[in-house]
Amino acid sequence: MEFTKLFYVLAAVFFIIGLKKLSHPKTARNGNIIASVGMLIAIVVTLVAFDVLNYKLIAIGMIIGAIIGSTFAIRVKMTGMPQMVAIFNGFGGGASALVAAAEFYSKVGHGEQTTFLLSTIALSVLVGTLTFTGSFIAFGKLQGFISGQPIVFKGQKVLNALIAIALITCSVMMVNNPDQMMTYFLAVVILSALLGITIVIPIGGADMPVVISLLNSYSGIAAAATGFVLLNNGLIISGALVGASGLILTNIMCKGMNRSLANVIFGAVGLTQEGASGDAAGKQMNIKSYSTEEAAMIFDAADKIIIVPGYGLAVAQAQHAAREVADYLESKGKTVLYAIHPVAGRMPGHMNVLLAEANVPYEHLKDLDEINPEFDTCDVALVLGANDVVNPAARHDKSSPIYGMPILDVDKSRTVIINKRTMNPGFAGIQNELFGFDNTIMVFGDAKQMLTDLLKDLKEL
């Protein structure tokens, strides 16, 4: 067993190094490989250490899982990556809950229960099941099966509180009441599944990046709890790392929106506002629509361009077209940068992943604090499908649900060119007052087609 602990420590070192490298796009791929090697070491050591396992069943499970996982990874488009991450979070939580449940039926049913074992089983099942159902609700919202708007009803918070109290009560009774242990165990499963649903349905699409990172943290906490159930150090370490990193990322996302986690969970941002609320809703906007030929002349006269990617770029798969336009502009001696908002898109790092896939130079990707001072000297800010993260209402409109959220200061540019397919509001459910600014022009259409036409027009000048 000593060599097992040694290899678990080695796997943990690989996990930590991998996480460290994931903090920068340039080293993220190597970090992913290093962390995967660490997981391979942990799996092999576990299989060798426990020789009572049925290797045939394990091999069958690994083959089925590999086929499903690789199929998803190959076929899912980059626009569907947030949904896939949500599903993976759910599967991680569900797997932890199933392992804990298996331990409950195999050991507790034969009189091997202890307070520690029952407590860890209850925690693992609670968090794992909650993560499973919550993640699939998040998937449904992202995929469009469920409305991206917050689903709220009267007394919802009271209901959630009652479910949480009942869940804690049943968990305690499961540990302290062996005669009705099975009944309380089933109650924990059902209440956890219900709480996962009721917690996520009132959260709007604008908060999905925070929800995904939080559910990712939950899946790690569930895995760590399952590690205590199995007394497996490798699982405890890996679960704790995932849980901690997920919480840190959640905190970063909340800071990027200038909101507390409680406000994200209970604030229902994204709920369509009734009546005219906010400055933009209360006045008529003067929208100026330009063609790509007219926009090309503006770009031709510019020296410094900042591209602001948003979910519209992801939907149109326009990252390669954006890079081609940027490459052409740079070949003409112009400066091109990319402004990355921490909550742009539908998951943490969504825009970074898309642009990295298109081989955009890492040094051109600038985060919020780096890029905002650059807008004062920017000739053209090209906004591709971003909405809430560039809405100036966040600075001054106290009635706006995004008030106080740090935004990209694109309105300070000499000219703002916004590409959208329609005038529909963003995921926060509010109209963007930037559309009516004097220095703003709109170029409507699919982002990929627009950029393709823009490049063609630029070359013809």
Image (cartoon, rainbow, N blue to C red):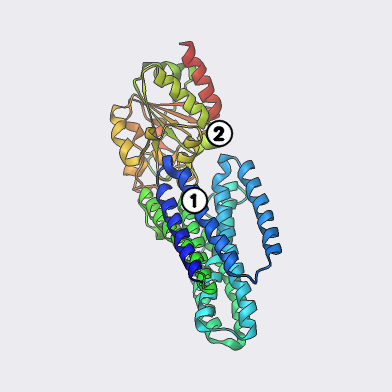
Residue 272 placement, left or right of 371: right
Residue 254 placement, left or right of 58: left
**Residue that protrudes farthest toward the top in the picture:** 461
In the displayed structure, would residue 168 be above or below residue 382?
below
Residue 398 location (% of width, % of height): 34, 48
The kind of residue tagged 2 is Gln
Q: Is residue 335 visible?
A: yes
Marks 2 and 1 sit apart, C-alpha to C-alpha, by 20 Å
Q: Nearer the viewer, residue 69 or 365?
A: 69
Q: Which mark is residue 317?
A: 2
The kind of residue tagged 1 is Met
Q: Residue at x 48, y 43 (%)?
A: 29
Quarter of the rendering occupied by the C terminus: top left
Q: Residue at x 48, y 32 (%)?
A: 359
Q: Residue at x 55, y 66 (%)?
A: 128
Residue 200 location (% of width, % of height): 52, 58
- Report which quarter residue 96 is drawn in: bottom right
Q: Which mark is residue 3?
A: none
10 Å crowding of disc 1: few (<14), some (14-19), many (20+): many
In the displayed structure, would residue 23 be above or below residue 338?
below
Q: Which mark is residue 208?
A: 1
Q: Residue at x 40, y 35 (%)?
A: 362
